[in-house]
Amino acid sequence: MQKKIPQRQCMGCRERKPKREMIRVVRCTDGEVRLDFGGKLNGRGAYVCPDGECLKKALRSKALDRSLEVTIPEEVIARLQKEMEGANG
């Protein structure tokens, strides 16, 4: 029997994809928002495709803010975009 692959929905494009292919954005227990490439940080998480466009869509629609139940500060958004660019390149 084949093992079930966990699926998560991208907050940008709204497509369901395997969890391992996604990048987790986490509001940690201390309230800080950061990227979780390993998927192991404690806190509330939301998933985004490893694509800058998906991140832009998620930020424009405030989907990440709603999912993480926090308003994401501008400096954190800039850091997330920079880290995602670094992850792709």
Image (spheres, rainbow, N blue to C red):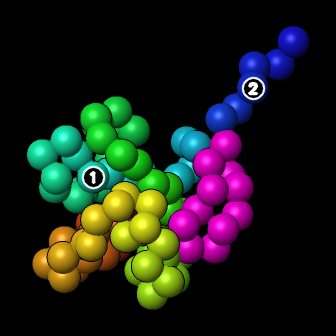
Q: Quadrant of residue 81?
A: bottom left
Is 30 placed left or right of 62 in the picture? left
Instruction: Evaluate whether residue 82 shows in this view.
Output: no
Q: Is residue 16 magenta?
A: yes
Disc 1 element:
strand
Direction top: furthest residue:
1
The residue sitting at 16% across, 55% down in the picture is: 32
In the depicted structure, whether residue 47 falls above or below residue 80: above
The residue sitting at 43% across, 79% down in the picture is: 62
Q: Residues within 10 Å of mark 1 (few under 14, many from 20)?
A: many
Find the magenta span and give its range: 7-18
In the depicted structure, whether residue 47 falls above or below residue 7: below
Disc 2 element:
loop
Q: Alpha carbon of mark 1 to alpha carbon of mark 2: how far?
A: 27 Å
In the depicted structure, whether residue 13 falls above or below residue 69: below
> Residue 65's spot in the image, x, y percent?
37, 70
Q: Give me the disc on residue 4.
A: 2
Q: Nearer the viewer, mark 1 or mark 2?
A: 1
Residue type pointed to by label 2 = Lys
The residue sitting at 39% across, 38% down in the picture is: 39
Is 17 placed left or right of 30 in the picture? right
Residue type pointed to by label 1 = Arg
Query: What residue would you read off at disc 1?
Result: 27
